[in-house]
Image: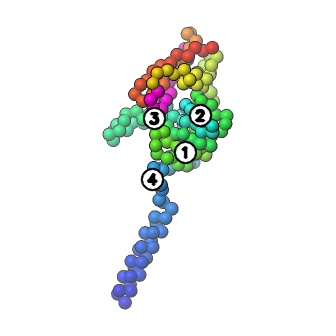
Amino acid sequence: MKKRFISILILLVGIGLIGCSSGTAKEPGIKDAPDNGSTPGMEGYVVAKEDRSILVVSSAPKDFSGTGGVKEFYDAIWFSNAPKNVSIGQKAQVWYSFVQESYPGQSKADKVTVLPDIRPEGARLTEAEAIAKALSEQTGPKVGVPVIKRADHDQTSKTWTITIKYGEDESPIQIEDK
């Protein structure tokens, strides 16, 4: 009787462990988005576009130096399933369910909202147009993912200054506001 009780107990524990683990296993390199609810998983500038995919890069850095990582890390994710009307230079919010961990990451956009474009008083170009122009006119080595750190308009000189960071190199690019 005692042997039968122990055998049944082991069987029940085994079934319980198998049941608890089903549905929670993920492929290596896949992680959930931060939130699938009302807040977007990411907000940043669209810095590249290929067919229906967009590369969105956050302009707000994360600091991982406290855990031995880098001081300035910028999220960057290629999103498939993007609307056709999204353009390079625009700021967008993206909702997604998962991201394949690479750099840049890869995911499928569940929803994309383009934020209203900024056109300072007296400016001819919008912020998005100035950023797109700066990205297309960038010269020199382009190692890494472009991060749009700043976009400033000077009404007096009628220029935009777009600060782009590639890896450790950061450079301001002047765009005439024509």
| Residue at mark 1 | 107
Q: Check the picture and name the quadrant holding the N terminus.
A: bottom left
Counting residues from the start of the chain, the first of labels 4 and 1 encountered is 4
| Residue at mark 2 | 49
Residue 83 visible in rendering? yes
| Residue at mark 4 | 28
Marks 1 and 2 sit apart, C-alpha to C-alpha, by 14 Å
Q: Mark 4 and 1 residues: CB-CB less than 8 Å, in contact? A: no
Magenta span: helix, strand or loop, mainly? Answer: strand
Name the residue located 45 percent from the left edge and 35 percent from the top edge: 74
Q: Residue 68, image x and y in percent?
A: 32, 39
Q: Residue 49, image x and y in percent?
A: 59, 34
* Residue found at the very far front of the displayed protein: 141
Counting residues from the start of the chain, the first of labels 2 and 3 encountered is 2
| Residue at mark 3 | 74
* Residue found at the very far bottom of the displayed protein: 1
Q: Which structural element holds mark 3?
A: loop
